[in-house]
Image (spheres, rainbow, N blue to C red):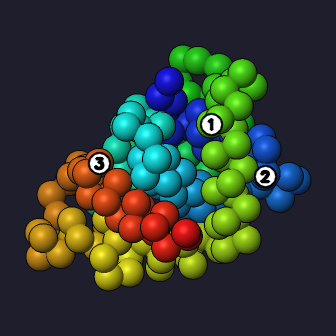
Amino acid sequence: MAYTPLALANTFVAHHGGINGISHMKLQKLAFYAYGWWLAYNSEPLLTEAPEVWKFGPVFDSLYGALRPFGSAPIAKPVAPPFGDATQIPPSDTLALQWVDWVWNRYGHLSALQLSDMTHEVGTPWQVEAAAKEYRVPRHHTIPDATTKRYFQGLAADLN
């Protein structure tokens, strides 16, 4: 089952935010890494939308809208979308929850800026798409799943 980016971000906050919370930018990057690693091993995406090419790296537009009011302040508890309850990945989806924990264990110690820098490295899905448009990317330009999948499958091959 695919989840909204906000449900994924809320799951990171609920499971790993602690009392200090997690910044919006870091949640965006963690969501991107969860999305990409999931695609490396699965045929269907983890999330209901693909990341877009924004100035500071890959961004999930709906997540940006939901978390924008926080600015750079840490988010310490799950956020409710407009007209709804704060959703998370349900406890019954143990595979997706294990994925969240795996991504956190791999990237959670990094700062938002470190994660952002990593998404800008040569060969990353964000950089490939931005370079193809000569860094003049139109608004709402999504990163194709095939590009993301290929990149993360390469990373997965390096793990073996």
| Residue 93 coordinates in the image, percent (x, y) | 66, 26
- Asked which secondary structure carries label 1, the reply is helix
Residue at horizontal 55 percent and vertical 45 percent from the top? 67
- Sequence-wise, which precedes: disc 3 or disc 2? 2
Separation (CA) of disc 1 from disc 3: 18 Å
Residue at horizontal 38 percent and vertical 81 percent from the top? 121
- Report the amino acid beneath label 1: Ala
- Numbered mark located on residue 134 in the image: none
Graded by Cα atoms within 10 Å as few (under 14), some (14 to 19) or many (20 or more), the crowding at tag 2 reads some
Q: To which residue does mark 3 refer?
A: 145
Residue 105 vs residue 77, the one in the foreground:
105
- Report the amino acid beneath label 2: Gly
| Residue 113 coordinates in the image, percent (x, y) | 56, 76
Residue 100 against residue 126 in the figure, above or below = above
Q: Dividing the picture into quarters, in which one does residue 53 lie? A: bottom left
- Asked which secondary structure carries label 2, the reply is loop
Separation (CA) of disc 1 from disc 2: 17 Å
| Residue 70 coordinates in the image, percent (x, y) | 61, 51
Q: To which residue does mark 1 refer?
A: 96
Q: To which residue does mark 2 refer?
A: 17
| Residue 112 coordinates in the image, percent (x, y) | 59, 70
Q: Are marks 1 and 3 in contact (CB under 8 Å)?
A: no
Separation (CA) of disc 3 from disc 2: 28 Å
Residue 116 vs residue 72, the one in the foreground:
116
- Sequence-wise, which precedes: disc 1 or disc 2? 2
Graded by Cα atoms within 10 Å as few (under 14), some (14 to 19) or many (20 or more), the crowding at tag 1 reads many
Residue 112 against residue 67 in the figure, above or below = below
